[in-house]
Image: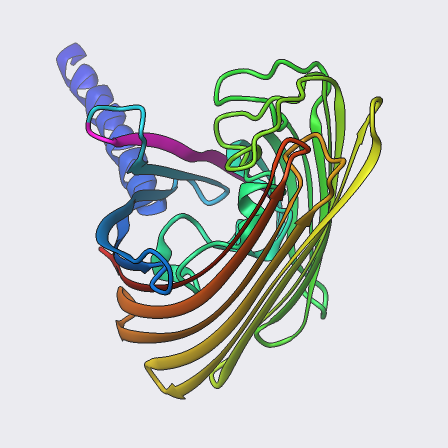
Amino acid sequence: MKTYCKRLLLLFLLSFVIGEDVVFAQTRSTQFSMYGHIQNHFDDFTNEPKSYFSLGEQDFFVTSNITERISFLGETVVRYDANTSSKFAPSLERAQIKYDYRPNHSVVVGKMHTPVNYWNDVYHHGRLFFPTIDRPHSFSYMVPLHTMGVRLQGQNIGSLKFGYDAVVGNGIASTDISDPNLNKAVTLAMRIEPSDNLQIRFSYFNDFLRTNTAGAHSGHGGALASTYKGALNFELWSNSIAYFGEGWEFLNEFSYNRNKTQWKGYANNFSNFTYLGVRVKENQTLYYLTDVMKVAENDLHTVGGEILKFALGYKYEFSYLYKVKIQVERLGTITHDHAHHDAQDRYDIKIQFAYGF
């Protein structure tokens, strides 16, 4: 009798565990993807022409629905790094856990893209999804690309599909594991979708840097690094208008950046990126872009300068996982850092094959 009862109890416990595993397996789903691109460059073909092939970022993307309310997103990129012997190194771009505490309302914890504009919040590092070959230039100077922190998020609320984001996290000077500043960076953003395929966004970002230091993935201080290492208050206002319909596409990303230092007061900077695409066939798109950025001479976060880029492009989609883009562009740059003044004007041709698996 005792043996029978033990077997019955063991069978009950086993069926409970198996049942839990089945439920868990039905709820949980994990997807792995990989995206990358290869490019051919014909740079500065009117002055000192150079032609070469290059291997772009290789993006490993994982998403997992752990339960009905909890999900995970991870993104690791292997990209060019001049400081390594192989010239490539991995970089952890995103690792975030999302909890849906109410319908259309979530809390996100981890390393994430800062939701300051449409491009940074919607696209990841796979060039397959970019409407053009390159990111806007503001991503190297003004846009805070990542933050490590907490994000309150709302989506698709009401008839206008209202959405909001409130983020508190490590700031521009931080790395993936630490932040030298006691105060945290703050992002406040809102968006609406008044019609199908149309989205309008506004955001505000603020970070007080005790020392003007650029972190590993901030996007700041890249080509125009400043030697100033004092305190600086960084503010960014952004507006995005995005429409991606069946016949034509439009994206405008505007950013106004104001930096304050005790030494030079306020510096006012701005950038504007405009993309317009027209589908000539179901899988073919002709597009035009302008990319303008101006950094004031008295700015101490980066060195002052101007960038003006025009481009014409053609995109051919073999499928949603294989695309070719051809882009002819004119790039004009002016740099002024009080020690020298440099101006360049060049024409480039780029061919990009982007893929996904």
Which residues fall within the magenta stretch?
Answer: 86-101
Q: Looking at the image, can residue 28 be seen?
A: no
In the image, residue 337 lies at what x, y percent?
65, 34
- In the figure, is residue 211 to the left or right of 145? right
Extreme-left residue of the structure = 3
Please give the name of the residue rendered at 42% of the width and 61% of the height, measured from the top-left corner. Answer: 130
- Where does the image place residue 286, in percent across and percent down from the top left? 42, 80
Residue 79, quarter of picture: top left
Where's residue 1, x and y in %?
Answer: 16, 14
Q: Is residue 206 visible?
A: yes
50 versus 282 height, above or below? above
Residue 102 vs residue 53, the one in the foreground: 53
Above or below residue 8? Residue 247 is below
Tell me, yes or no, whether the highlighted magenta stretch contains residue 91: yes
Measured as percent of width and height from the top left, residue 259 is found at 77, 35
Of the 4 image quadrants, the one containing the C terminus is bottom left
Q: Is residue 203 above or below residue 157?
A: above
The residue sitting at 39% across, 38% down in the picture is 74
Q: How is the image coloured?
A: rainbow
- 122 part of magenta stretch: no
- Name the residue at 54% across, 58% down: 332
Farthest-out residue, top: 2
Nearest to the observer: residue 68 or residue 316: 316
The image quadrant of residue 40 is bottom left
Q: Magenta span: helix, strand or loop, mainly? A: strand
Is 87 left or right of 287, judged from the image as shown?
A: left
State the residue at coordinates (31%, 44%).
Answer: 59
